[in-house]
Image (tube, coloured by chain):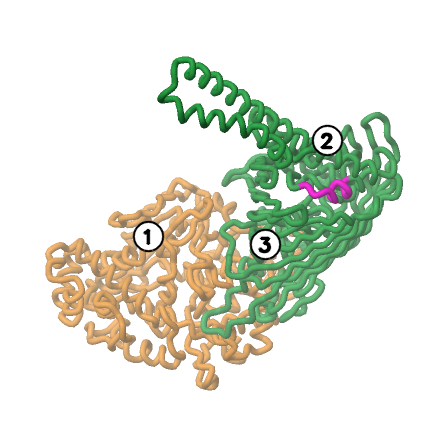
Chain colours: A green, B orange
């Protein structure tokens, strides 16, 4: 397959006489006879035809290169898939192929990933997603609608368009592209509604060479399974797991830049400098429980890093973080990875005239593994965070139900099995056991002082309940039912061993394209 | 604003030198020099603040109702024991509300609706948009400084050379040709004084020094702070935040919002009596404002309903607060006051109902337990099975001293629904957790101990010299 450079080298000596003739004709036109002028015009026409032919060849060459890339990817996928239709590892292999044109959702070594590699909404199809007539423009999207029923408090059942996301990308050239995602949460976003409109990603990626690319802008942090690949077709269960919500604050994005690349042996690496966390936003004095059910737990932004990440919204730039993420997917069906981020953070404001406390440092690390033997899909993750220099701030807020933790962690183990398949229908039941602790240790306080017994859950008269614990152990049983590669129906039930009243039944629909 | 020295200095200056010019006696006199750096307007404001000759009676200045030694609140001892100040042309007319502290008042934001929540503004009902507008009003109030109009204020000012001199120095002679402009300048001068003079924002409490690592809170004070903060116990910080809120780098212990908390009717406010009369002259209070929102079948004739009336925004306010007289859901709401110096600002609440912090807390935590007809038609007196703190079984008393059978008896029944029953420390009977107060007697002691640490004038290098407020002394309760 010829590259564009090769094609240009091949064409150049063949075009040179024509170009020379054209130049000579132009230089002698003033003295030429009418016959000469006719010859000159003929040469001009020929030159235009050659130029058009050259453009056509260049376009065909681009298309051939894109096709070649897609074929390579599919070959890699076929090599990785233990058997047709098995979820997951194919995606990991897809990730192994350096793919500067891949959209953020493209490579997804995630548990419960799309049941068929060809279903990838973006990676394989990304160049092909270019809209006819619009050059390198690409569009994609995903979203999820759910019904959740806290079976101990059925009056809190909810039905929600949790998120509707659309992505816009543009391929500037074969080495440079732009990607962005825009999300509407909870259907209606306005000053008087519960929804939000967010820019979730907004970055430019430039391939420096075959081994290294550079990315700059607002991008997703390469932590865990879910943060970068959070499309509903890519994970088990209607709601995202707690470890990758409360400990890794998915969808966690920061502004900055990174260098990333992959090796032929199946190693991936990613190192970056990003915006950091802001502890000055910490709420030591929530008057009411920040959440009273599992859904609220996920949405309350009360978790340590949920409460302090900045999402590049007028983010404080005084303190930056660094991160390193490594992954290995060189063995078919196996994905191993880990990442660490650390950096100083905006401190809690010290009272006037007081000695400034030391600048806090926020660190988060995680390790994850996934193995997909035959129809099985087994995965596990451990994530742990730390925040230093919190003693003075906590000591100044005795009695707080929400002091700043100095350590927090979570882990889960998950198993799924492809139980049934017919046509493009697939059924994948799963089970997950996870543990999270948003306050494993504290400085300057013995820990949260939680009200005993029932307390008002809001200022609304008669709205009472228990103040929740900030740690729990959760079992989830459920199934993903795929209808083709882009649609998934999900159902699951969760049991909580600490906040026992949080148990819930979830049902929902997810899509990604 | 900058941090002032220890309290000894504050009170020595304010209570001694400056306070001598206020109160009920004497002419304006020469107030002590202000701290260096005050503007000409602020110096004029200082002179105005203490000048009794600007009142119709010649006996009342700002400092009469905002006594420096009491954190710039009124002194019931000079008001015949009333919960509201006396004033008027003959100093015999009672006001309607307990005078609020002026310490830290300059941090108050102008009135605004924060997502629909009324916030800020001056006076207890936020009806003045600025300190300058607020400061003008008592001069022409019939039951305060008693001048009939700005022209009378101007005349008194021209008769008070020691105040006129800095006033003219700051504003020029020409302003004296227009009484309305003169009154506006008086307001501006007072606002400058209260804003610039650091003695209005000393931040020299033991709590401040504790935050700075220069003082230690006792165990009881520490426990009290924790109870103050905890949402299941005092939950005080919900309205009186112990952390800075953006209005100042310091915690101001108010969020400047409004709340209806159903404070009992105070029969020590003459306007509340079945037949409102001056306790001195016996004359009817013909300056009672119109009752716009009081139903015809209300239990009593006069109610102070805060945001929805009876007082309207001043007509000369250039940025008037919205008029809320038709929004009855705001009836009964008053602005949350700062708790700084609360130990020296008794009595408490807008109507001065309670004389001690202990009583305030006892009321808070038993307000909806065994108190009145809404929850219990026959309140049980203190003792087994009864309200542990109120001898009659309820803090809600009729004029006769017996339990008032109307719930929240300082509001027409129609506005009981506006009362905040959804937040701790209130424990409404619908609370599935039961009827137990959220604070025990010993916990109330601890919270009071903490509140006492909010009194300015603590000197960490000489803690023994700290002038402990009377109700904070050991055994005071």
The answer to whether residue B224 is seen in the rendering is no
Q: In terms of image quadrants, where is residue A345?
A: bottom right
Q: Is residue B402 magenta?
A: no
Q: CA distance from mark 2 to mark 1?
A: 58 Å
Residue A261 point in image, percent of width and height:
68, 49
Q: In terms of image quadrants, where is residue B89?
A: bottom left
Q: Is residue A96 magenta?
A: yes
Q: Do callouts 3 and 2 point to residues on the same chain? A: yes
Look at the picture and state if B380 lies above or below B344.
above
Host chain of mark 3: A
Residue that mark 2 sits on? A486
Look at the picture and state if B208 lies above or below B265.
below
Residue that mark 3 sits on? A309
The magenta segment is: A91-99
Residue B311 point in image, percent of width and height:
33, 50
Query: Which tag, 3 or 2, sits closer to the chain's start?
Result: 3
Instruction: State which quarter of the image contains the N terminus of chain A.
Output: top right
Camera-side mark, 3 or 1: 3
Camera-side mark, 2 or 1: 2
Most foreground residue, B377 or B43: B43
> Residue drawn at (52%, 19%), measured in percent from left and top?
A46
> Residue drawn at (52%, 45%), measured in percent from left and top?
B417
Instruction: State which quarter of the image contains the C terminus of chain A.
Output: top right
Residue B307 point in image, percent of width and height:
40, 49
Q: In terms of image quadrants, where is residue A183?
A: top right
Q: CA distance from mark 3 to mark 1?
A: 37 Å
Look at the picture and state if A236 lies above or below A345.
above
A86 relative position to B213: left or right: right
- What secondary structure is marked by label 3? loop
Host chain of mark 2: A
Residue that mark 1 sits on? B129
């Amino acid at each position: 397959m010829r590259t564009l450079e090769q094609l240009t080298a091949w064409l150049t000596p063949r075009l040179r006489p024509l170009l020379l003739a054209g130049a000579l004709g132009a230089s002698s036109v003033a003295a030429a006879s009418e016959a000469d002028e006719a010859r000159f015009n003929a040469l001009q026409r020929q030159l235009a035809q050659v130029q058009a032919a050259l453009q056509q060849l260049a376009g065909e060459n681009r298309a051939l290169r894109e096709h070649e890339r897609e074929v390579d990817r599919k070959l890699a996928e076929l090599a990785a898939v233990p058997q047709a239709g098995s979820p997951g590892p194919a995606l990991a292999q897809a990730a192994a192929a350096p793919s500067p044109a891949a959209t953020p959702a493209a490579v997804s070594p995630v548990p419960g990933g799309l049941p068929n590699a060809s279903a990838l909404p973006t990676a394989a199809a990304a160049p092909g997603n270019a809209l006819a007539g619009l050059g390198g423009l690409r569009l994609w999207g995903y979203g999820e609608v759910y019904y959740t029923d806290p079976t101990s408090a059925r009056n809190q059942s909810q039905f929600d368009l949790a998120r509707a996301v659309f992505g816009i990308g543009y391929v500037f050239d074969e080495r440079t592209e732009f990607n962005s995602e825009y999300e509407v949460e909870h259907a209606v976003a306005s000053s008087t509604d519960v929804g939000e409109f967010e820019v979730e990603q907004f970055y430019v990626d430039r391939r420096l060479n075959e081994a290294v690319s550079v990315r700059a802008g607002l991008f997703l942090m390469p932590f865990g399974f879910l943060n970068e690949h959070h499309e509903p077709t890519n994970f088990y269960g209607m709601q995202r797991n707690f470890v990758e919500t409360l400990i890794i604050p998915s969808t966690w994005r920061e502004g900055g830049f990174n260098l990333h690349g992959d090796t032929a042996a199946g190693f991936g690496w990613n190192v970056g400098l990003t915006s950091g966390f802001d502890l000055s936003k910490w709420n030591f004095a929530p008057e009411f429980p920040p959440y009273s059910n599992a859904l609220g737990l996920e949405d309350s932004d009360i978790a340590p890093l949920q409460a302090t990440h900045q999402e590049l919204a007028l983010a404080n730039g005084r303190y930056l973080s660094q991160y390193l993420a490594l992954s290995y997917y060189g063995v078919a069906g196996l994905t191993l990875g880990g990442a660490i981020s650390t950096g100083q953070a905006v401190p809690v404001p010290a009272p006037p005239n007081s000695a400034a406390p030391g600048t806090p440092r926020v660190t988060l690390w995680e390790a994850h593994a996934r193995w997909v033997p035959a129809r099985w899909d087994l995965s596990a993750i451990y994530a742990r965070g730390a925040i230093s220099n919190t003693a003075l701030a906590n000591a100044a807020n005795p009695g707080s139900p929400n002091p700043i933790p100095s350590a927090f962690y979570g882990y889960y183990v998950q198993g799924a099995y492809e139980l049934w398949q017919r046509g493009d229908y697939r059924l994948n039941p799963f089970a997950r056991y996870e543990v999270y602790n948003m306050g494993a240790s504290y400085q300057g306080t013995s820990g949260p002082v939680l009200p005993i017994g029932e307390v008002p859950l809001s200022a609304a008269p008669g709205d009472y309940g228990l103040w929740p614990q900030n740690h729990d152990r959760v079992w989830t049983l459920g199934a993903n039912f795929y209808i083709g590669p882009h649609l998934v129906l999900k159902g699951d039930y969760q049991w909580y061993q600490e906040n026992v009243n949080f148990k819930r039944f979830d049902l929902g629909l997810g899509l990604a394209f | 604003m900058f941090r002032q020295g220890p309290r000894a200095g504050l009170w020595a200056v304010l209570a001694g030198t400056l306070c001598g010019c206020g109160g009920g006696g004497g002419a304006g006199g020469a107030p002590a020099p202000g701290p260096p750096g005050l503007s000409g307007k602020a110096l004029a404001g200082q002179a105005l603040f203490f000048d009794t000759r600007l009142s119709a009676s010649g006996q009342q200045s700002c400092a009469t109702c905002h006594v420096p030694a009491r954190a710039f609140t009124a002194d019931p001892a000079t008001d015949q024991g009333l919960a509201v100040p006396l004033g008027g042309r003959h100093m015999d007319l009672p006001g309607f509300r307990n005078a609020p502290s002026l310490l830290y008042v300059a941090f108050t934001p102008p009135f605004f609706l924060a997502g629909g929540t009324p916030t800020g503004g001056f006076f207890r009902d936020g009806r003045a948009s600025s300190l300058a507008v607020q400061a003008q009003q008592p001069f022409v109030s019939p039951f305060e400084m008693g001048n009939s109009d700005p022209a009378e204020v101007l005349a008194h000012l021209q008769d008070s050379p020691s105040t006129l001199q800095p006033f003219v120095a700051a504003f020029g002679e020409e302003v004296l040709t227009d009484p309305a402009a003169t009154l506006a300048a008086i307001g501006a001068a007072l606002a400058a004084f209260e804003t610039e003079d650091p003695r209005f924002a000393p931040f020299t409490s033991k709590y401040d020094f504790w935050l700075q690592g220069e003082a230690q809170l006792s165990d009881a004070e520490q426990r009290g702070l924790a109870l103050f903060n905890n949402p299941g116990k005092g939950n005080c910080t919900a309205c009186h935040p112990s952390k800075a809120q953006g209005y100042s780098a310091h915690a101001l212990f108010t969020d400047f919002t409004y709340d209806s908390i159903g404070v009992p009717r105070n029969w020590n406010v003459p306007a509340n009596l079945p037949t409102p009369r001056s306790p001195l002259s016996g004359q009817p209070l013909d300056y009672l404002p119109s009752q716009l929102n009081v139903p015809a079948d209300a239990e009593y004739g006069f109610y102070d309903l805060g945001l929805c009336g009876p007082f309207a925004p001043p007509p000369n306010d250039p940025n008037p607060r919205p008029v809320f007289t038709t929004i009855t859901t705001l009836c009964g709401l008053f602005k949350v006051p700062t708790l700084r110096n609360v130990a020296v600002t008794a009595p408490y609440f807008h109507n001065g109902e309670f004389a001690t912090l202990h009583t305030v807390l006892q009321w808070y935590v038993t307000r909806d337990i065994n108190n009145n007809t809404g929850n219990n038609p026959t309140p049980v007196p203190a003792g087994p099975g009864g309200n542990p703190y109120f001898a009659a079984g309820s803090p809600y008393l009729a004029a006769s001293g017996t339990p008032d059978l109307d719930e929240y008896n300082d509001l027409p029944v129609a506005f009981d629904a506006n009362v905040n029953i959804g937040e701790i420390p209130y424990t409404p009977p619908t609370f599935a957790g039961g009827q137990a107060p959220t604070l025990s007697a010993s916990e109330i002691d601890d919270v009071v101990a903490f509140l006492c640490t909010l009194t300015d004038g603590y000197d960490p290098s000489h803690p023994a010299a700290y002038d402990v407020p009377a109700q904070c002394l050991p055994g005071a309760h």
